[in-house]
Image: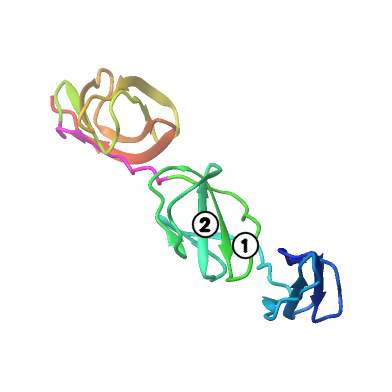
């Protein structure tokens, strides 16, 4: 809608005499106004309208830990869980997990909001080892890159998939866990070891030697 104000009468360069009108056409529109005494203004107020000024709705593209808009524009408004962020650039590096959206401004209008992108930080790959090897009575299970108070499940299988022994351990502090795992009943051989931490599972083929 194109609108003029401040007068009692109006005259647009299109010939219209209303104070406002709708248009789908591009162009420069100007208006004169007259006061209650019928005195017309000397200068015309002008406004430029660009056809199809509303930009297309962007999409969010994720490249590892960076999000960016699929459409380049003058200004970008980023949202996290519905709240407007301070970021106004083409890309954003999230500092929190959540649902991100973006809308763009092309110099004339804002687009509608993009679809949500549910951003999550990648989980750290945990590392583990069993030592010493050869062992006498027990092995020590060392786990790295895991948070404290996580439930750690370790299961030994033979090569045909038969479960031999399983234990549940609670990880300790400082992202490094050292737990003694007693190997009663397990002799030298090759085993399938399954370790599960907080829903992430790792399988490994391990050869152990038991000293006599």
Picture quarter containing residue 137?
Answer: top left
Q: Residues within 10 Å of mark 2 (few under 14, many from 20)?
A: some
Mark toward the start of the polypeptide (2 vs 1): 2
The residue lying at 17 percent from left, 33 percent from top is: 131
Q: Is residue 89 left or right of residue 181?
A: right
Q: Position of residue 15 (x, y in %)?
A: 86, 79
Q: Which residue is mark 2?
A: 77
Q: Is residue 26 left or right of residue 16?
A: left
Picture quarter containing residue 64?
Answer: bottom left
Quadrant where the C terminus is found in the figure: top left
Reply above or below: 87 against 44. above
In magenta, the rendered stretch is: 121-134
Q: Residues within 10 Å of mark 1 (few under 14, many from 20)?
A: some
The residue lying at 43 percent from left, 56 percent from top is: 87
Judging depth in this view, the residue of 131 and 3 nearest the camera is: 3
Q: Is residue 184 visible?
A: yes
State whether the magenta stretch is mostly helix, strand or loop. Answer: loop
The residue lying at 41 percent from left, 50 percent from top is: 94
**How many dots with numbers?**
2
Q: Is residue 23 visible?
A: no
Instruction: Name the residue furthest front.
Output: 37
Q: Secondary structure at mark 2?
A: strand
In the drawing, what numbered circle is on residue 110? Answer: 1
Picture quarter containing residue 127?
Answer: top left
Q: Position of residue 83 (x, y in %)?
A: 52, 43
Q: Position of residue 101 (x, y in %)?
A: 56, 52
Tags 2 and 1 touching, CB below 8 Å = yes
In the rendered structure, does residue 65 fall within the stretch colored magenta? Answer: no
Q: Secondary structure at mark 1?
A: loop
In the rendered structure, does residue 129 fall within the stretch colored magenta? Answer: yes
Cα–Cα gap, marks 2 and 1: 9 Å
Q: Is residue 68 left or right of residue 191?
A: right
């Amino acid at each position: 809608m194109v609108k003029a104000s401040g007068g009692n009468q109006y005259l647009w360069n299109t010939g219209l005499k209303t104070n406002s009108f709708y248009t789908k056409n591009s162009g420069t529109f100007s208006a004169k106004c007259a006061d209650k005494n019928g005195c017309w203004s000397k200068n015309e107020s002008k406004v430029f309208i660009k056809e199809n000024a509303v930009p297309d709705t962007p999409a969010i593209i994720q490249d590892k830990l960076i999000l960016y808009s699929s459409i380049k524009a003058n200004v970008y408004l980023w949202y996290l869980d519905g709240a407007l962020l301070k970021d106004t650039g083409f890309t954003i590096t999230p500092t929190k997990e959540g649902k991100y959206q973006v809308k763009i401004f092309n110099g004339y209008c804002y687009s509608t909001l993009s679809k949500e992108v549910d951003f999550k930080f990648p989980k750290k790959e945990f590392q583990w080892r069993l030592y010493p090897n050869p062992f006498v009575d027990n092995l020590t299970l060392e786990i790295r890159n895991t948070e404290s108070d996580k439930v750690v499940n370790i299961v030994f299988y033979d090569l045909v998939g038969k479960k031999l022994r399983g234990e549940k351990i609670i990880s300790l502090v400082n992202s490094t866990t050292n737990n003694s795992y007693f190997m009663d009943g397990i002799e030298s051989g090759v085993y399938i070891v399954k370790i599960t931490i907080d829903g992430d599972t790792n399988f490994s083929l391990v050869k152990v030697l038991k000293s006599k």
